[in-house]
Image: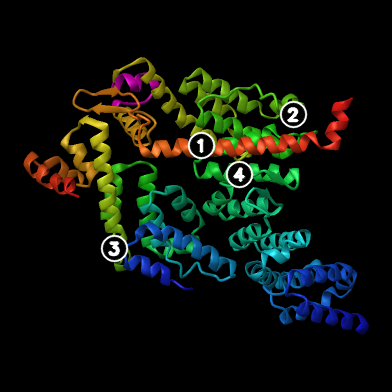
Amino acid sequence: MDFSALNDALASKSYDQIADICDTLMLQVSSQGVVFQDEWPYAIHLLGHIYISDINSARFLWKRIPLAVKERQPEVVAAWNIGQKLWTRDYAGVHEAIREFNWSPEVQGIVASFSELYTKKMFELLVSAYSTISTQDTALFLGLNADDAANCNLSSFFTWLITFVQI
Amino acid sequence: MNLNMNSVETLVAQIHGLSGSISDINQLHSLLKQSEDLFQSESTRLAPLLTELDPFMHSLGYLYILDACTSAPISKEQASELVLSIARFINLCAAEQIRLAPDKFTSVCKRFKDQVMLLEDPMQGVAPMLTAIRKLQLSSEHLTTLHPDFLLFCLLAKCYKPGLSILEDDIFDVDQPRDFFLYCYYGGMICIGQKKFSKALELLHNVVTAPMSILNAIVVEAYKKYILVSLIHVGQFSISFPKYTSSVAQRNLKNFSQPYLELANSYGAGKISELELCVQAHNEKFEFDKNLGLVKQVVSCMYKRNIQRLTQTYLTLSLQDIANTVQLNSAKEAEMHVLQMIQDGEIYATINQKDGMVRFLEDPEQYKTCEMIERIDSSIQRIMMLSRKLTDMDEQLSCDPLYLAKVSL
């Protein structure tokens, strides 16, 4: 299986193209009758769909993944966990799902990039949807965990928030 | 026997010789048509000949021999090899040559579909079938017999995105009515899976209102999904059919979809508790029809509809009041619902957490941006194209002898 296009996209951080590249390659390999399920980079494929907010395709990909792969590759399950939180709109849960797994080096780049992108989108949503909102909720939506959010005082919060405004 | 094989080998030589220019190919085509019986009688011995031919340069000859080889019964061991060799042919063949024998190409692809289904690996068929459609089609407006097979593969393999790319084409030429019914029904299911409810509604509407003299199972199932998608996307369902619906559909469809019509009635009343009772009552039927997922989406849509209805009456409303009116459990739940609707662009509002209030806003779209103007422009272009097509069809129809015979009476 020729993963060069995928590797190039990962190297150049063109994460928005990963889903298409993986989909096309999967259909191609499948039509050649190759048994690819054991070697397929499902975690990256799932994250590719999640990166472009195509949770529908991520769901269907998850349904196609064989049980054996789900049992043997915890990273695939962890990647889907992020998708699941997005699907159920558990806004704070997405950040938790990203934080709680020890991602492998191949996947760290796309996870970090998605985390930034998601936080930015959440920030824009909060700005447009709320005229007032508690600091605790803001912190939760933007990725601080529950304890930090409850304990953070206003000035340290704003210092941290300014980093997002500058993105 | 030997004599026949000699004739076959002569034909192969002629395939080599006559695959150059267009006039040569036409000559070859007549020769091949005349030799069909010969191919059929030697079908079991033709497979090795394929290695002497190039699938691209000698597509037409290759097609005839492949068709004859595959017409014989296939054993399970041969199935996977056959599938691979047909897929290879589809990828490499020259479209201009195979379009001379569309029926043969279609029957080879049909056998491909049957074998892929036997191997229970529908994903294997997705890419080749898409290529086959693109090569067989005379234009992107042409619906072939292969379209529904492709969509079926997409559904079974859970690869919905390739299906969507085909569904974006507007169809104006249809070979067989049955293909059209299946294409629209499967297409509707794919759009539902990708949450493109507007397109799904359009496709299902086409199935329900298509001309037909007797009812078929596809229309009955499509009608059930049509009711559900209508409730999800439009928020209401009208039981009266458009005028152009066939009388057979108008008279009979409702008899097969009583539980769905009751659900639609219950939805119209606007109370979540009543709707959930209705769902419970017909749970088994919905599950049997494999529509339970859609029914659940109908229920969650009702919360949205009820909140949207509030925007027509109120400028501001407290989260607790929203929760009470819409029958949610708490103000926090109401806040999450409103936030999700704002995120999806289904409502324009701002939440004031400090006071626990929601302020409903007007749609900020001013219709002045460049993107909006481009959208309007492309819609106008599309309508002009449709209008031209309609005029052409009208002119063609007025010259049609069947039509003139009926009208002159």
Decide if residue B207 is on the left or right side of residue A30: right
Residue segment shown in magenta: B318-331
Q: Are marks 2 and 3 in contact (CB under 8 Å)?
A: no
Which residue lies at the image location 83% right of the left edge and 33% below the top edge? Answer: B403
Mark 2 secondary-structure assignment:
loop
Picture quarter containing residue B67?
bottom right
Q: Which residue is mark 4?
A: B170
Q: Which of the two marks, 4 or 3, is nearer to us in this view?
A: 4
- Amino acid carrying label 2: it is Ser
Q: Residues within 10 Å of mark 2 (few under 14, many from 20)?
A: some
**Left or right: A166, with B60 as reference point:** left
The residue to which callout 3 is attached is A108
Q: CA distance from mark 3 to mark 1?
A: 43 Å
Q: Position of residue B185 (x, y in %)?
A: 64, 42
Asked whether, in this view, residue A61 is left or right of residue B386, the answer is: left
State the residue position of label 2: B246
The answer to whether the residue labelled 1 contacts the one labelled 2, judged by CB atoms less than 8 Å apart, is no
Query: Which label's residue is closer to the chain start, 4 or 1?
Result: 4
Residue B275 spot, x, y in % from top left: 51, 24
Q: Is residue A152 above or below residue B227?
A: below
Q: Earlier in the sequence, mark 2 or mark 4?
A: 4
To the question of a shared chain for discs 4 and 3, the answer is: no
Residue A96 visible:
no
Single out the mark in the foreground, 4 or 1. 1
The amino acid sitting under disc 3 is: Gln
